[in-house]
Amino acid sequence: MTGVHAGLLDDASALEPRRVGSLEHYPQVRSRFLGQTHDLVVCVPPEYHLEPGRRFPVLYLHDGQNVFDDLPMSPFGVQWGVDTTTRALIHAGIVEPIILVAIGNAGRDRIDEYTPTRDNSHDAGGMADRYGQMLVYEIKPFIDRHYRTRRSARDTGLAGSSLGGLLTLHLGLTHPAIFGKLALLSPSVWWDDRWIVRQLNASDARRPDLAIWLDVGTGEKRMLKGTQLLHRMLLRKGWQDGIDLHYMEADGALHDERAWGHRTGLFLRFLFPAYNGRTVAGEGFSG
C-alpha cells in the first residue's frame, strides 16, 4: 500500500482505516517531517458510538506495535493490552472514556526519532523534534478533524516507555499548549549523559497544568538510578508527589512490555480518573 500524507488530508476518504475488532488501523502514513512511514491505530471507547454528541480526551502512545491486544504487531510477542485495560476501567467507572491513538515506530529509525539529541557514544539520535512536528502538526490535527475529541492540553495525554518515555517528557516540555498529561514508563534518562535531566534543570519552573506519571522497575538496573534522579529534579522544579506527579518503583519489574502492561491501569487511573465535574488528574489517586 502506498503511504498517505496525514498532514495534507482534507477528506477522511483519502485515508480509510482498516477495521480490526474495536480498532481502526491506518497503515503506512507518510509525513513531510520524517522519511519513514508510521502506522496509526485508533481505539474509541464504547461510549463514542452510544453518545454521538459527546467529545472525548485523547491519549497518544508511542511504539504503537506493542500496545493493543486486538492488533498484535509486537516483534516481542507481548502487548501492553492498553485497549483491554482501558475498556475494563471505563466499564468499572474508574477512568473516563478516552480515545487511544497508537503511533507505530519506524523500526531501525526508532532510536533517531525518539531521541532529542545526537549521542556520539551511540552515533545516533537527534530527530525527536521532527517526530514532534509530525505528531503536533499532522497526526493530532488529523485525529481532531476526524474524531470527536476534546482538543485542549488538559484533555490530551502522551505515553511511552524506554526511549518512548524520554520522547514523551521532551515533547511534553517543548509543546506545553498541546500536552497536559504524560506517562513516563522506565524512561531512558541515560541518553546522552542524562541530557533530559540537564535540560529540565535549565528550564523554567514547573508547568502547573502538566500532570506526570513516572515509574521504573527495581529490576531495571540501568534505568533505576536515572529515573530516581529525574524524580528528584521534578520535585526540585516544583512538581508535587500525589498532586501533579506520581512516582512508582515497581518491585522486581523488568524492562519489558509485560511489566509496562501491568502498570497501564495505574497510570490511566492517575491521568484520566472518572470525571465528576471537578476531578482533575491525580485527585483521589492512591494506587
Image (spheres, rainbow, N blue to C red):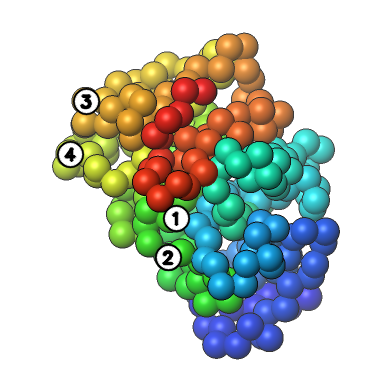
- Of marks 1 and 4, the one in the foreground: 1
Q: Position of residue 29 (x, y in %)?
A: 64, 70
Residue indicated by mark 3: 236
Q: How far, Cα to Cα, is label 2 from label 1?
A: 7 Å
Q: Position of residue 272 (x, y in %)?
A: 49, 44
Q: Residue at x 58, y 38 (%)?
A: 94
Q: Which amino acid lies under the numbered mark 1 shown in the image of this protein?
A: Thr
Q: How far, Cα to Cα, is label 4 from label 3?
A: 9 Å
Residue indicated by mark 1: 156
Say whether residue 60 is visible: no
Asked whether disc 1 touches disc 3, contact meaning CB atoms under 8 Å apart, the reply is: no
- Of marks 2 and 4, the one in the foreground: 2
Q: Look at the numbered disc 1 and give the secondary structure of its residue.
A: strand
Q: Quadrant of residue 43?
A: bottom right
Badge 2 or badge 3: first in the primary sequence: 2
- In the image, 285: left or right of 87? left
Q: Name the disc covering residue 151, or none.
A: 2
Q: Which amino acid lies under the numbered mark 4 shown in the image of this protein?
A: Ala
Q: How far, Cα to Cα, is label 2 from label 3?
A: 30 Å
- In the image, 228: left or right of 103? left
Q: Which amino acid lies under the numbered mark 2 shown in the image of this protein?
A: Arg
